[in-house]
Image: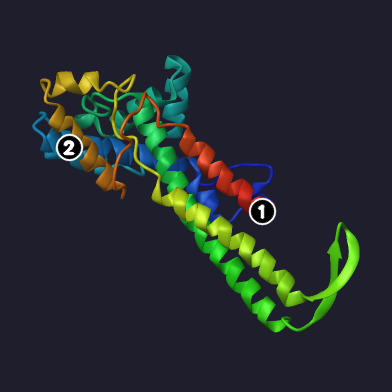
Amino acid sequence: MTNKYESPLSSRYASDYMLGLFSSDTRYRTWRKLWIALAKAEKSLGLPITDEQIAQMQENIDNIDYECVRIREKEVRHDVMAHVYAFGKVAPKAAGIIHLGATSCYVTDNTDLVLYRDALIYLRTELLKVIANLCDFAEKYKAMPTLGYTHYQPAQLVTVGKRASLWIQDFLTDLHEIDFAIENIKFLGCRGTTGTEASFMDLFDGDSKKIDEMNRLIAVEFNFDECFDVCGQTYPRKADSRILNCLSSIAQS
């Protein structure tokens, strides 16, 4: 199965949306979309890439030969290069320009950022449903008395509605954290093997403005407003920590 994310927990707990979002098909289609976005940006900035090459890539986004990838990866010991090879087999006119100037993290890390952003947006929608249901519950039982506790000992009466409002308040805090995480996810862009963009300095004859414009064009293609100001080969892992904090916070609630 390549259209479902596989996990021992997935069949019991995961939604169809999340299973599809983190599937092999979605991940590797996104890789191909990133290669197309790169080629389009490079062409618009003067590199010798043709419309025919881009069109052939676009026609084969979904045409992923996983067996070809498996065989090639066994030979070269590199997942990204195996997918570059397989894409070139179905888009032969573009084989020479796929991944031009890029490093592996261009597709791996930018794809992760796309998937994480989309997952957080979905999670936000689900969290709003939880809050709405709890609001209805709190309103329905706002006057129903229940035993309150202090230091785990029975104490004065409170209401079920009051207790539910405490849960809602926690989930609203989680919602604010998700909003902050979504608003602050930036794109990696195409930075080269160590983040210096040296390969693109060669391709664009030292014109750094063209590199900035290339990254802007690619980011816009995936609905990101901006790229990280400074990167190594990867995006800053603080972004992962921020997302994990959101998930942990919801789990605590």
Q: Is residue 168 left or right of residue 180?
A: right
- x and y percentages locating residue 9 in the rendered image: 68, 46
In the image, residue 168 above or below residue 33:
below
Way the structure is coloured: rainbow
Q: Is residue 161 left or right of residue 67?
A: right
- x and y percentages locating residue 186 in the rendered image: 36, 42
Closer to the camera in the image, 159 or 184: 159
As drawn, the label of residue 123 is: none
- x and y percentages locating residue 1 in the rendered image: 55, 42
Question: Does residue 69 appear in the picture of this structure?
Answer: yes
The amino acid marked with disc number 2 is: Glu
Residue under label 2: 213
In the image, residue 14 above or below residue 132:
above
- x and y percentages locating residue 223 in the rendered image: 31, 50
Q: Residue furthest right?
A: 153
Closer to the camera in the image, 163 or 198: 163
Residue drawn at x 13%, y 31% is 209
Q: Is residue 1 left or right of residue 121?
A: right
Question: For mark 1, does the 10 Å Cα neighbourhood hold few (<14), some (14 to 19), or many (20 or more) residues?
Answer: few
Res 98 quadrant in image: top left
The amino acid marked with disc number 1 is: Tyr
Residue drawn at x 45%, y 51% is 180
Res 113 quadrant in image: top left
Residue under label 1: 13
Closer to the camera in the image, 108 or 121: 121
